[in-house]
Image (spheres, rainbow, N blue to C red):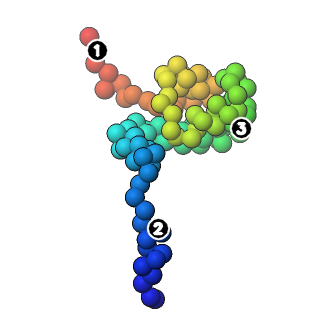
């Protein structure tokens, strides 16, 4: 295969300011973004096991299907309040804190 310098020049363009900002955001927020993606996948799995659609969840949360889609994108900083509502609706825990990790005062 012949090396194509012209193709390399078209592909190897410097990052735009927008691309740089997006990369910086992902880098700075990698830990919670990973956790958010894990939570979203677990919710999707629990919905599937319950035979519930995203539209069903949206209706029971009293939000739009677009909002549920956004929550399940894995890019949302979940609020505890929202997680609690979803757990109640699904009837299964999304995240658990082992009892031995809870400090008794």
Q: Secondary structure at mark 2?
A: helix
Measured as percent of width and height from the top left, residue 29 is found at 38, 38
- Label 1 vs label 3: CA separation? 39 Å
At 59% from the left edge and 26% from the top edge, which residue is drawn? 86
Q: Which residue is mark 1?
A: 104
Q: Which residue is mark 3?
A: 53
4 vs 26, nearest the viewer: 4
Q: Position of 50 compared to 38: left or right?
A: right
**Which quadrant does the C terminus fall into?**
top left
Q: How many marks?
A: 3
Q: Earlier in the sequence, mark 1 or mark 2?
A: 2
What is the quadrant of residue 8 in the picture?
bottom left
- Mark 1: few/some/many CA within 10 Å (<14, 14-19, 20+): few
Measured as percent of width and height from the top left, residue 64 is found at 70, 28
Q: Which residue is mark 2?
A: 11
7 in relation to 93, above or below: below
Q: Nearer the viewer, mark 1 or mark 3?
A: 3
């Amino acid at each position: 295969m012949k090396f194509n310098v012209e193709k390399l020049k078209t592909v190897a363009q410097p990052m735009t300011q927008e691309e740089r900002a997006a990369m910086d955001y992902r880098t700075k927020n990698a830990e919670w973004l990973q956790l958010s993606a894990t939570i979203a996948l677990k919710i999707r799995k629990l919905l599937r096991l319950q035979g519930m659609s995203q539209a069903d969840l949206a209706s029971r949360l009293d939000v739009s299907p677009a909002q549920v889609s956004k929550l399940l994108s894995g890019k949302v900083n979940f609020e505890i309040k929202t997680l609690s509502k979803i757990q109640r609706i699904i009837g299964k825990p999304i995240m658990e804190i082992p009892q031995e990790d809870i400090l008794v005062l």
